[in-house]
Amino acid sequence: MSKLKALIIDDNKEVASAFSDVLRSVGFDCEALLYVKDALTSLAVTVPDLILLDMRLGQDIGGEDILQQIRANPRFDNTRVIIITAYPEVAELVSELADLVLIKPVDFDQLSTLSKRMGTLDVKHRIFQFRDSVTQLFNQEFFVTRLEHAFARDTRRKDFLFAVILFELHLSEPRAPHVQPEVKTRVLQEVASRLRQELRSTDTVARYSEWQFAVLVEEFKRPEDIDIIVRRIQARLKNSYPVGSHTYHFAVKCGAVIYNKDYPLPKDMIEAAQQSLA
């Protein structure tokens, strides 16, 4: 079986070389390009399995333009794109088009793990399997992966704060035993849309289970920030959900846990958030 191909587009030669080393170590055949013109020439004749794309390329055509061209071309429907940027505000603009956003400085261990998982997916279909098929949010597997890396970062940075927030929806009106499948799909997609609007692109948002959503918030300043996020999202999710001729209302339970040494493993932190749902 031939190697998966990766294209790295970054105008910093040392960074591009380092990324190449990481991807080659997990089995990718890499091409690193520093100039937009060379990248566009390569994309005209090849279809990489994975693209690492820097947003600030310092030229007339930037990373956002390249990303738009990639997503507009059906040739790249199965190409996964990881955005690399030092500017979270830039990530906000393109997060819907990228499979993953990493903020510089990039943790090489994290990049290695994520790239390896992408490379071991079913090559025949090459479907990006980190997203929930209904909401297009991340799925439980990917959420746990990101939480594992947050634990690893904590061992290297004493000032690193991260938290897990769970939101669970329960139908309150109309009083039906269950929601019809087509209604459920519409409501879940609307919940996902509201979460995306309320959270940063650098936060990891996942559909964790049937009616439960999980958020990993990293790099916040004060513990009080989590309370603010929780109240804001609860208010947004409690709003009505009109579908067809009916309007549905949901009660929202929330559980939030800020990491501390009482949680030796990621699963302990998730269990604590589950237990605090109220």
Image (spheres, rainbow, N blue to C red):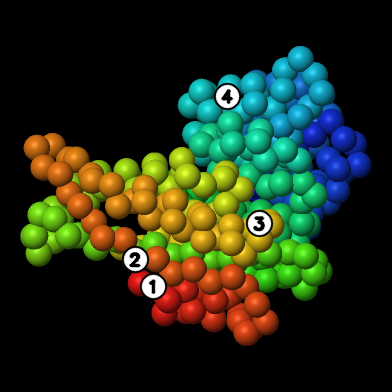
Foreground of the two, 40 or 155: 155
Separation of residues labelled 4 and 3 (CA atoms): 30 Å
SS for callout 1: loop
**Circles 2 and 1 in contact, beta carbons < 8 Å:** yes
Q: Give the Cα separation between the discs numbered 2 and 1.
A: 6 Å
Q: Which SS class for mark 3?
A: loop
Image location of residue 83, percent across then percent down: 66, 40
**Percent of width and height locating residue 18:** 85, 48
Residue marked by disc 2 = 253
Q: What amino acid type should be assigned to the residue bearing mark 4?
A: Gln
* Residue at which label 1 appears: 277
Residue, disc 3: 220
Residue that appears at 80% across and 34% down: 10
Tell me if residue 180 comes above or below residue 198 in the rendering. Answer: below
Mark 4 and mark 2: span between their CA atoms? 38 Å
Task: Return the disc, 1 or 3, that comes first in the chain's sequence.
Answer: 3
Tag 2: amino acid: Lys
Q: Which mark is residue 68?
A: 4
The image quadrant that residue 69 belongs to is top right
SS type, badge 2? strand
Where's residue 111, x and y in %?
71, 55
